[in-house]
């Protein structure tokens, strides 16, 4: 690979055209399916077969006689019946998957899942829903209430809006699998560096989609769809159109209004390839979806300046005292499938853990305070203006002073659902171990290294402080010359 070829961020026109082409097909197929059901019901009522299977079924029924509930009463009375409670338990077990359901209500693309996920096959007995109307009604509730869901494309998440709002609203956590897409209009070899993950022993061929070369006025070359894809994923969480919404004084409910936990699996986000994120990511994470999550899990974030900036932007989605978990990449994308990668302990930290005193708030609101800072101005919100993440109950008793620590239940590993109580410092936001003191440190307590993205705002403030010192030195030098 030519080391000088750096991709630029864009949205691919061909991918967008394909998404627009498939969207009307979903609507037309739904309308045709409903019409097909009405026609089958009409034929069934008149004892008219429409296929060999229906003919065999209708021939087993007495011709000219409609089967009613009363006609079944005599024959079913002598048979065995399971209690309703047992039937519901069986139905719930059949509708619950041990693994997340990937791209519900959308066509699953084989290149977006791993070989292990392909071998799992069907995880739920969906045919239970076709048994009767009662089974369909109860089973549909279990299907959407008892399972976890993962989405591999922004379009699949938008299609989730076709689900009835009563099933979407209770969902509190989802997984977004953001697979970086690279495009090129020249035949060049691009590779993913082995430093992407410790499981990779050598550089891996990068999955690149070829595009035709256009005129010189159209910008081409090597390009990527990375941070813009995250923006499109998060934009799909916006409120879908609801024709029944009548109260114009209140905003429409978001796609998942009760979402409190989000996991982002970033795939093929390489340190050498991914450019800086634009203003769109800041706008949707810090404003539209700002301070809405209690927990954010991110895997595969690049350990460079671009990753540091994106990590700071994504942390804007967390409420005060929210939990931010950073972990190694979970997948690497090959040409036709994903490869699962081993995981380790999360690097956990608390976002905006420090509580300012009332005197600090008064000083911040003082109109006579002429001190300028990079966060000053009319647009700067005061910390605590929005409700923080709820305090988790039942934690152990801390040996430290009250108000100096925060307790959170943190997963014991990247892919584990088991959690353990962990103590965090309000001063640094990081985990407190036996040898830790409440002094500010940029070292990650999980791996002992300095992670980019730990405090991007502090990085900016330090730069501004250095500039102020330089300006003061220049002013003092000029005054000495005048004297």
Image: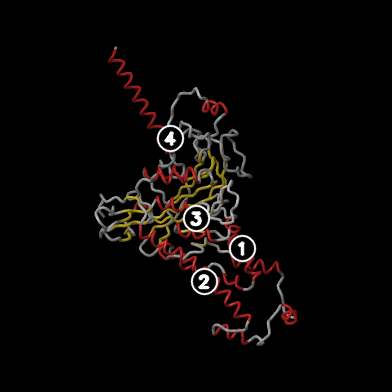
Instruction: State the residue position of label 3.
Output: 175
Q: Residue at x 28, y 61 (%)?
A: 212
Q: Which residue is mark 2?
A: 32
Which of disc 4 and disc 2 is earlier in sequence?
Answer: 2
Q: Marks 3 and 2, Cα distance to the nearest angstrom?
A: 32 Å
Return the residue found at the far top: 483
Taking 179 as reference, is 403 above or below it?
above
**Label 2 SS:** helix
Dot 1 falls on a residue whose secondary structure is: helix
The reply to whether callout 2 and callout 4 are in contact (CB within 8 Å) is no
Q: Label 4: few (<14), some or many (≥20) within 10 Å?
A: few
Closer to the camera in the image, 325 or 146 = 146
Cα gap from disc 2 to disc 4, whole angstroms: 57 Å
Sequence-wise, the earlier of marks 4 and 3 is: 3
- Please tell me which residue is depicted at 39% across the width and 29% down the height of the picture: 465
Percent across and percent down for residue 77 are: 75, 79
Measuring from the top left, give residue 433's x and y in whole percent.
Answer: 51, 40
Q: CA distance from mark 3 to mark 1?
A: 19 Å
Helix, strand or loop status at disc 3 = strand
Q: Which residue is mark 4?
A: 458
Q: Which residue position holds label 1?
A: 142
């Amino acid at each position: 690979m030519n080391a000088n070829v750096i991709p630029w961020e864009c949205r691919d026109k061909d991918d967008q055209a394909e998404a627009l082409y498939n969207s009307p097909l979903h609507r037309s197929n739904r309308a045709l399916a409903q019409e097909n059901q009405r026609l089958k019901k009409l034929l069934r009522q008149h004892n008219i077969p429409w296929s060999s299977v229906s003919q065999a079924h209708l021939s087993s029924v007495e011709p000219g006689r409609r089967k009613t509930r009363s006609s079944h009463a005599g024959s079913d009375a002598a048979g065995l019946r399971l209690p309703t409670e047992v039937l519901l338990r069986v139905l719930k077990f059949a509708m619950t998957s041990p693994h997340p359901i990937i791209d519900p209500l959308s066509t699953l693309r084989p290149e977006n899942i791993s070989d292990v996920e392909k071998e799992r096959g069907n995880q739920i007995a969906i045919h239970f829903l076709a048994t009767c109307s009662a089974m369909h009604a109860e089973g549909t509730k279990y299907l959407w209430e008892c399972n976890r869901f993962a989405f591999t494309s922004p379009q699949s998440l938008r299609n989730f809006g076709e689900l009835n709002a009563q099933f979407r609203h209770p969902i509190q956590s989802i997984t977004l699998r953001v697979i970086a897409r690279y495009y090129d209009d020249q035949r060049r070899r691009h590779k993913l560096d082995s430093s992407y993950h410790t499981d990779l022993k050598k550089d891996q061929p990068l999955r690149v989609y070829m595009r035709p070369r256009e005129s010189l006025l159209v910008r081409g070359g090597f390009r990527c769809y990375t941070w813009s894809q995250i923006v499109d994923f998060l934009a799909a969480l916006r409120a879908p159109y609801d024709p029944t919404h009548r109260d114009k004084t209140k905003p429409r409910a978001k796609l998942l209004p009760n979402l409190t936990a989000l996991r982002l699996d970033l795939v093929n986000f390489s340190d050498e390839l991914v450019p800086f994120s634009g203003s769109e990511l800041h706008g949707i994470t810090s404003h539209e979806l700002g301070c809405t999550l209690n927990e954010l899990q991110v895997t595969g974030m690049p350990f460079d300046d671009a990753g540091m900036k994106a990590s700071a932007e994504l942390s804007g989605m967390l409420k005060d005292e929210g939990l931010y978990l950073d972990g190694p990449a979970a997948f690497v994308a090959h040409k036709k499938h994903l490869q699962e990668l081993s995981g380790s302990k999360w690097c956990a930290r608390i976002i905006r853990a420090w509580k300012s005193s009332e005197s600090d708030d008064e000083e911040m609101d003082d109109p006579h305070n002429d001190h300028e800072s990079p966060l000053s101005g009319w647009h700067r919100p005061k910390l605590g203006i929005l409700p923080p993440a709820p305090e988790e109950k039942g934690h152990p008793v801390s040996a430290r002073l009250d108000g100096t620590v925060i307790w959170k239940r943190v997963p014991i590993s990247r892919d584990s659902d088991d959690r353990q109580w962990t103590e965090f410092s309000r001063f640094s936001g990081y985990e407190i171990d036996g040898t830790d003191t409440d002094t500010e440190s940029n070292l990650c307590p999980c791996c002992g290294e300095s992670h980019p993205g730990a405090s991007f705002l502090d990085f900016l403030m330090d730069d501004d402080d250095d500039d102020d010192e330089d300006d003061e030195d220049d002013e003092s030098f000029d005054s000495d010359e005048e004297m």
